[in-house]
Amino acid sequence: MSDMDTQDTQRERELSAPEIPAEAEEGGAVLGAVVYFSSASENTSRFIKNCHLEKQGINVYRIPLRPKEPALNVDEPYILVVPTYGGGNPKKAVPVQVKKFLNDPANRAGIQGVIASGNTNFGEAFCAAGDMISAKCKVPFMYYFELMGTQQDREKVTRGVVDFFTRRKTAQANTAQS
């Protein structure tokens, strides 16, 4: 590969800034990240913003809604929060934008888990996007909620995300000391 090819590849894969940057812990370290997709209804966006993950040291990234928006490129471990599409048809459960994001091997490499939202009217396909992504990416399906979620859902997700990344950070520190 020539230097010009390398420069073009680096330019194409310019890392994205978080939509909501973490308010870093003491010492300046970011605890982890959440990547989410929200449709024009903004249900998932409102849910994430009401979790206030940035106050817990979590970077928050949003997968673009429209194809003309710059691609999201994430280079840190993250938990994916995704709505379920398809009106009950499991084949259409994962939004196209999320598929495109995960089809980038560099983005897919960072996924640590998935949280899904859905509509109970979808019956057995309720939160099917979470099941599908969990199976395909071999990561845990960590939580699910309906539409915009409840206050209890937001508290559980916030606590779960923080606990997950805290345990991960502790395990990494212990491994480094060994």
Image (spheres, rainbow, N blue to C red):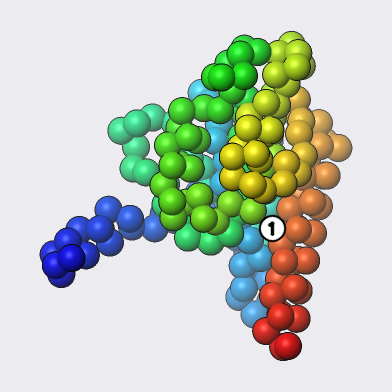
State the image coordinates of residue 146 (x, y, percent, origin top left). Answer: 75, 25
Instruction: Assess disc 1: are there few (<14), some (14-19) or many (≥20) residues with their C-alpha within 10 Å of its C-alpha.
Output: some
Report the side of 1 relative to 117 (left or right): left
Q: Residue at x 72, y 88 (%)?
A: 177
| Residue hosting label 1 | 55
State the image coordinates of residue 89 (x, y, percent, origin top left). Answer: 61, 13
Work out whether residue 71 or residue 30 is closer to the camera in this orientation and state it: 71
State the image coordinates of residue 7 (x, y, percent, origin top left). Answer: 20, 64
| Residue 176, visible in the rendered structure | yes
Secondary structure at badge 1 equals: helix
| Residue 46, visible in the rendered structure | no
The answer to which quarter of the image holds residue 106 is bottom left
Q: Quadrant of the C terminus?
A: bottom right
Q: Residue at x 69, y 58 (%)?
A: 55
Q: Residue furthest bottom?
A: 177
Q: Amino acid at mark 1?
A: Lys
The answer to which quarter of the image holds residue 152 is top right
Position of 148 relative to 29 (above/below)? above
Report the side of 92 relative to 23 (left or right): left
The answer to which quarter of the image holds residue 130 is top right
Q: Residue at x 53, y 61 (%)?
A: 76
Q: Total label count?
A: 1
Position of 133 relative to 1 (above/below)? above
Q: Quadrant of the N terminus?
A: bottom left
Position of 112 relative to 101 (above/below)? below
Position of 138 relative to 120 (above/below)? below
